[in-house]
Amino acid sequence: MEVTKQNGRRKFLSKLASIAGTMGAGMALGDRSSAGPKENTSPTGWPSQLVINETAPKWNPRDMPKPGEKIHEFNIEVTIEKIEILPLEEHHFYTFNKSMPGPEIRVKEGDWVKVNLTNKTHDFHTIHWHGIYVPCEMDGVPLGTQYPVGYNQTFTYLWRAQPAGTHFYHCHNMTNMHIQAGLYGALIIEPYDGEDIVQKTFPYERDYTLVLSEVDTEFLREQMNEMLMMGEMMDAMNGSKKLMAKMDGHMMGWFANKEAFLKAIKDGWVPPYHQSRTGPAMRVEPNFFLINGRPYPMTEHMHIKQGENIRVRLINAGILVHNMHLHGHDFWHVCTDGSPLATPVRMNTVPVFAGSTVDIMIQGTNPGGWHFHDHSDISLMNNGKSPGGMMTMLMYEDAEEAGFKFKEIIALDS
Ligand SMILES: [Cu+2]
């Protein structure tokens, strides 16, 4: 890495020298250093915008709220709900406040957030604040930073909202299963007024959040039934609070360090992945691909008018990469994981990696009703049948005025 940097700098300096050379001998070295480019400027411009310590928190994550500082308090309850993701396709999910995804949390950078998480199921849950500079005890890793929250228990999270940008939250207990079960939601931290570089560059009025995820309904049903049955038994025997207080790594595969893990194996503990005891693990093969908890055609449309800019926040809470493609337009990729890119990138297909967020700006330049979807055809099916899955529409509200006639087939909710 260092080598590339030096090579780049050497090339740049030699380019500078040749430019100076063409200016003739009258151009003294001293003149060039005072009027010429600064040390950290390059021809592409981006290194001059790079602030090396930009990943450092603005506020010490271990601070506590001071009198007068704004605290947003939320109560979030985990319950089991029956949700019809498509007509005739009804499944049981875990939900935050009875909705899937959970409620969008939107606060200003620097404000405090207090969340009281109450568990009304016989399984265990936590909330992990993905991408946020929380104090370690608030990170929501069960048996890593806290005891998981058992039946009828409440755990209070308190942290300061930083850094600004598009983030999300999710349960971190048996994460794969519990996210598929519905325990995830958007978390948007707005920058201070006037500090939103995206708003400054592309003034926008509409702001969409699209949370991408998948679910294997077969896997989910089996795992939920198994965990709830075990949880009910544990609660009946001991009360989960008492039991969890006695819990150690042996029960869930968490250990203080590698030595403790190896010692447990030597002492006869059989890890859950070992086939001679448990049989082959069930493979996760998602059969529904969701945008904000619903597959196409039950996804919500996005709306735009000619001349408008809209901001679309893509959050991948799932386990696969999703390559989101917009028909008839290019868009600007402006942020990744909440951070503005040094230079926006023009594209029509943007990969959103598992656990990552991407903000794009769409400019209203081509009236019509346009498809916006994951370009993997596997994700464009409902239970193996297409059309369906991770797709929505970008609908121009003034398309007919521009001479475009919507056909009924693509005007499902317009
Ligand atoms: Cu959970």
Image: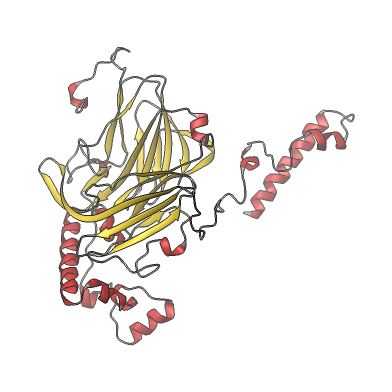
Quadrant of the image containing the N terminus: bottom right
Q: Is residue 329 above or below residue 286?
A: above
In this view, which residue lies farthest toward the bottom? Answer: 267
Is 271 rendered above or below residue 313?
Answer: below
Query: Is 282 situated left or right of 70 in this image?
Result: left
Rendering quadrant holding ligand 1: bottom left
Residue 387 at what x, y percent from top left?
20, 36
Q: Which picture quadrant has residue 120?
A: bottom left
What colour scheme has been applied to the protein in the rendered image? secondary structure
Q: Residue furthest left?
A: 88
Above or below, 180 relative to 10: below
Q: Is residue 173 visible?
A: no
Q: Quadrant of the C terminus?
A: top left
Would you say 194 lies left or right of 280 here? right
Q: State whether residue 340 is above or below residue 409.
A: below
Q: Quadrant of residue 397?
A: top left
Residue sitting at x 20%, y 35% = 297
Give whichever of 32, 298 is nearer the camera.
298
Residue 209 seen in this snapshot = yes
Q: Position of residue 412 (x, y in %)?
A: 19, 28
Give residue 199's position: percent from left, percent from top: 48, 32
